[in-house]
């Protein structure tokens, strides 16, 4: 990332982008990078968040946009009681309930929610890289809703 892209990450203020860029240019591992950036002013928690924003390409504008919409509810699995609750939730037009990523991406006109869901899909894809077995991309599209 260049300086402007780093500056456009949420929580990056007061010239922190220069410190991040300088550390990134000399580090070979994540732990060293974090401790080179950390200071009394910039805690490790904040550094962790910023690095996660960078990994997931979450910008300050994404953060602002996310506050302008009602968030979606993503259903990954449910029980029989959950089915009853889901039917009640689905009647509320103010709530965006997602049980199928593909269906939502194909049918929704809400660009902000689609962008948020794309970041979630990217996060899942990155997470699955750590699987020891069956590391597959796009599990959000291929895994079915779990009913227990």
Image (spheres, rainbow, N blue to C red):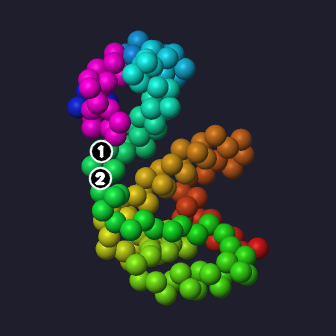
Residue 77 is at least partly visible in this image: yes
Q: Is 16 covered by the magenta stretch?
A: yes
Q: Kindly identify which numbered label has been placed on residue 124.
A: none
Q: CA distance from mark 1 to mark 2?
A: 6 Å
**In the image, farthest residue toward the right:** 148
Q: Is 66 covered by the magenta stretch?
A: no
- Above or below, 138 relative to 130: below
Residue at image location 39% in from the left, 22% down from the top? 41
Residue at image location 45% in from the left, 68% down from the top? 72
Residue 2 is at least partly visible in this image: no
Q: Is residue 132 left or right of residue 102?
A: right
* Closest to the observer, 141 or 77: 77
Where residue 107 appears, x then y in whole percent?
39, 77
Q: Are marks 1 and 2 in contact (CB under 8 Å)?
A: yes
* Closest to the observer, 115 or 137: 115
Where residue 69 appears, x then y in whole percent?
34, 66
Q: Secondary structure at mark 2?
A: helix
Where residue 93 appears, x then y in whole percent?
41, 83
Q: Is residue 131 left or right of residue 103?
A: right
Q: Which residues are magenta?
A: 5-22
Q: Is residue 46 left or right of residue 139?
A: left
- Above or below, 147 relative to 115: below
Q: Which residue is mark 1?
A: 60
Q: Which residue is mark 2?
A: 64
**In the image, farthest residue toward the left:** 4
Where residue 10 appears, x then y in whole percent?
34, 40
Q: Secondary structure at mark 1?
A: helix
């Amino acid at each position: 990332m260049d300086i402007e892209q780093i500056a456009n990450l949420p929580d990056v203020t007061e010239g922190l982008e220069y410190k991040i860029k300088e550390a990134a240019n000399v580090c070979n591992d994540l732990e060293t990078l974090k401790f080179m950036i950390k200071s009394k002013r910039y805690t490790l928690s904040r550094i962790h968040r910023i690095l996660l924003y960078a990994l997931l390409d979450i910008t300050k504008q994404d953060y602002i946009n996310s506050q302008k919409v009602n968030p979606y509810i993503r259903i990954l699995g449910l029980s029989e009681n959950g089915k009853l609750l889901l039917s009640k939730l689905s009647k509320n037009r103010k709530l965006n309930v997602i049980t199928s990523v593909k269906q939502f991406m194909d049918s929704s006109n809400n660009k902000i929610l689609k962008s948020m869901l794309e970041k979630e899909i990217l996060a899942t894809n990155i997470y699955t890289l750590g699987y020891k077995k069956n590391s597959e991309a796009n599990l959000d599209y291929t895994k079915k809703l779990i009913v227990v």
